[in-house]
């Protein structure tokens, strides 16, 4: 349990410092692998280990999990991804997709979960 919490905290610090806030301020995309867990709680990379490319907008906490909210290059829309399922992010050279002017995290979270993120 401690190891998992440490990894999540470490990853959230990395996202905040290297990508989430730092990358958002630098206006750069991030790349990372995204994982599922099997029955033995081993990490299995989604999409054969293909990198997820994301323009980070917010790092939020909800229901005991951190989420990265940002624009997905592949899906061409704003998505939310659980931080504990992400590999260590790399800051890419490519400029991030700007957050839409009218985007509001409160409205997005209400649409997704029926309640605003706190």
Image (tube, rainbow, N blue to C red):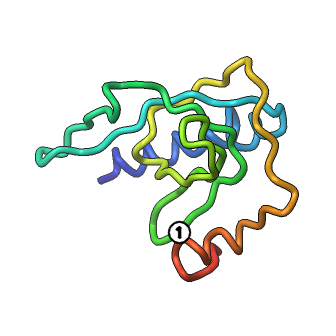
**Most extreme residue toward the right, as rendered?**
101
Quarter of the image that includes the C terminus: bottom right
Across and down, in percent, residue 42 comes to: 20, 38
Seen from the viewer's position, the closer of residues 97 and 61 is 97
Left of 9 or right of it: where is 118? Answer: right
Q: Is residue 116 above or below residue 102?
A: below
Left of 27 or right of it: where is 52? Answer: left
Left of 103 or right of it: where is 85? Answer: left
Q: Is residue 91 above or below residue 34?
A: above
* Identity of the residue drawn at 33% across and 35% down: 46
Across and down, in percent, residue 67 comes to: 54, 55
* Identity of the residue drawn at 34% across and 31% down: 47
* Identity of the residue drawn at 59% across and 75% down: 111
Tag 1: Cα neighbours inside 10 Å, few (<14), some, or many (≥20)? few
Seen from the viewer's position, the closer of residues 3 and 37 is 37
Question: How many discs appear?
Answer: 1
Residue 3 sits in quarter: top left
* Identity of the residue drawn at 50% across and 30% down: 32
Residue topped by disc 1: 62
**Most extreme residue toward the bottom, as rendered?**
114
Instruction: Kindly state the secondary structure of the residue where label 1 is placed.
Output: strand
Across and down, in percent, residue 41 comes to: 19, 45
Residue 17 sits in quarter: top right
Left of 92 or right of it: where is 10? Answer: left
């Amino acid at each position: 349990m401690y190891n998992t919490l440490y990894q999540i905290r470490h990853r959230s610090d990395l996202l905040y410092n290297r990508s989430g806030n730092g990358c958002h301020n630098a206006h750069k995309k991030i790349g990372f692998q995204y994982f599922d867990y099997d029955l033995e709680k081993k990490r299995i990379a989604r999409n054969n280990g293909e990198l997820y490319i994301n323009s980070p907008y917010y790092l939020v906490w909800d229901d005991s999990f951190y989420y990265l909210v940002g624009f997905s290059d592949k899906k061409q829309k704003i998505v939310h991804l659980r931080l504990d399922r992400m590999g260590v992010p790399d800051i890419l050279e490519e400029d991030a997709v700007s957050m839409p002017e009218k985007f509001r995290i409160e409205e997005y979270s209400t649409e997704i979960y029926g309640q605003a993120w706190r």
